[in-house]
Image (cartoon, rainbow, N blue to C red):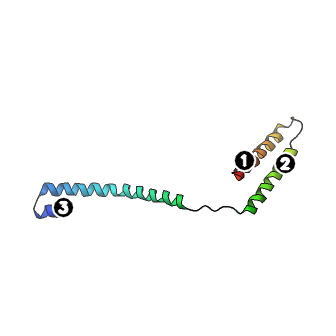
């Protein structure tokens, strides 16, 4: 609007300033739009409802994990001459224990 008025009164300096302003505004438009899009996506992410699992499913999984842990504890070799088996069992037991902790939380 100011650029048009400057053209009407033949003010070249004012018209040039308005042209530079419009160019800067257009150049920054993409950045502003990306910022606003990211901001609205973040807000949407926090506003989404998280579904809770059914209690029966949690109980079944907890029982399964406990059973698996007891099987792994009982199958641990008594002699330490087989480090590969012990390492595999220990690794599996760690994974099951971590799953139990995550499920508890």
Residue 26 x %, y %: 30, 58
Determine which residue is flagged by label 2: 70
* Residue at image point 16% right, 58% down: 15
Q: CA distance from mark 1 to mark 2?
A: 14 Å
Decide which of tag 1 and tag 2 comes sooner along the chain: 2
To which quarter of the image does residue 29 belong?
Answer: bottom left
In the rendered image, the residue lying farthest to the left is 9
Which comes sooner in the sequence, label 3 or label 2? 3
Helix, strand or loop for disc 2: helix
Q: Are marks 1 and 2 in contact (CB under 8 Å)?
A: no
Classify residue 59 by image quadrant: bottom right
As drawn, is 76 to the left or to the right of 38? right
Crowdedness near tag 2: few (<14), some (14–19) or many (≥20) residues, C-alpha within 10 Å? few
Label 3 sits on a secondary structure element that is helix
Q: Which residue is mark 1?
A: 98
Q: Residue 55, percent across and down?
A: 73, 61
Residue 23 position within the rendered picture, expressed as x and y whole percent measured from the top left: 26, 56
Cα–Cα span, label 3 and label 2: 80 Å
Residue pointed to by mark 3? 2
For residue 35, side relative to residue 12 (left or right): right
Residue 17 place in picture, x, y as percent: 19, 54
Tags 3 and 2 touching, CB below 8 Å: no
Left or right of 52, for residue 6: left
Of helix, strand and loop, which one carries label 1? helix
Mark 1 or mark 3: name the one nearer the start of the chain: 3
Q: Say few, some or many: other residues with alpha carbon within 10 Å of mark 1 (under 14 / 14 to 19 / 20 or more).
A: few
């Amino acid at each position: 609007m100011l650029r048009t008025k400057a053209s009407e009164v033949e003010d070249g300096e004012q018209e040039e300033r308005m042209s530079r302003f419009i160019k800067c505004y257009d150049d920054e438009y993409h950045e502003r739009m990306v910022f606003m899009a990211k901001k609205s996506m973040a807000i949407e992410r926090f506003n989404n409802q998280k579904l809770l699992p059914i209690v029966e499913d949690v109980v079944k999984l907890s029982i399964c994990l406990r059973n698996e842990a007891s099987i792994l504890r009982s199958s641990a070799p008594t002699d330490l001459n087989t480090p590969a088996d012990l390492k595999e069992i220990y690794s599996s037991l760690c994974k099951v224990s971590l799953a139990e902790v995550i499920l508890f939380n």
